[in-house]
Image (cartoon, rainbow, N blue to C red):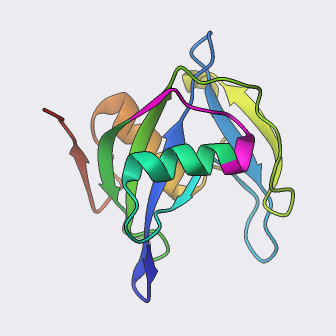
Amino acid sequence: MADGNGTVGVGVVVRDADGRVLLGLRDKDGEPTVWCLPGGAVDPGESFERAAARELAEETGLVAGSVAVTHLVLSPDPGVTATAVAVARDVRGDPQVLEPHVFRTWQWFPDDGLPDALFPATRLALDALTTGSAPDAAASYRLERS
């Protein structure tokens, strides 16, 4: 959901059988070319989980069997104010470029071989997921569901 102060978004973490994370090379007119997680804005009235599954399917064609939101990261950057970190499980399909005006390609990366040019919200999301916190964020929260 977007407003004048930023966006509430979701970043979707998808891992392959080797534990590598899926990143897309985002090449959108007027923006720097960076690697990022599948994801995007949460629509009004939409849950983080539904937004994650929708964005994953829209951008990559992948279908998640389930989605769990594990962290919420508040960015110091005014562009994306809050990002829910969603982990997709039981994912079916092969990643495809379904939005060629936004993405050049999708590629799998090991955690110790991530590209330097990461979208800021993606870096914060992956930091929160791998270390439990995102030190460069305004704040990060580990979510526990009961």
The residue positioned 33% from the left and 31% from the top of the image is: 131
In the rendered image, residue 75 lying in the magenta stretch gets the answer no
Question: Would you say residue 37 is visible in this rendering?
Answer: no
* Figure disc tally: 0
Apparent side of residue 92 relative to residue 145 in the rendered image (left or right): right
Residue 32 location, quadrant: bottom right
On the picture, is 55 further left or further right than 100?
left
Task: Tell me the quarter of the image containing the C terminus.
Answer: top left
The residue that appears at 30% across and 51% down in the rendered structure is 72
Residue 28 vertical position relative to residue 67 in the rendered view, above or below: below
> What is the magenta range?
58-67
Q: Position of residue 28 (x, y in %)?
A: 78, 67
Residue 126: percent from left, percent from top: 46, 39
Q: Residue furthest top?
A: 18
- For the N terminus, the image quarter is bottom left
Left or right of 114 in this view: 69: left
Q: Residue at x 66, y 23 (%)?
A: 92
Residue closest to the eye, 49 or 84: 49
x, y percent for residue 33: 76, 59
Q: Is residue 65 magenta?
A: yes
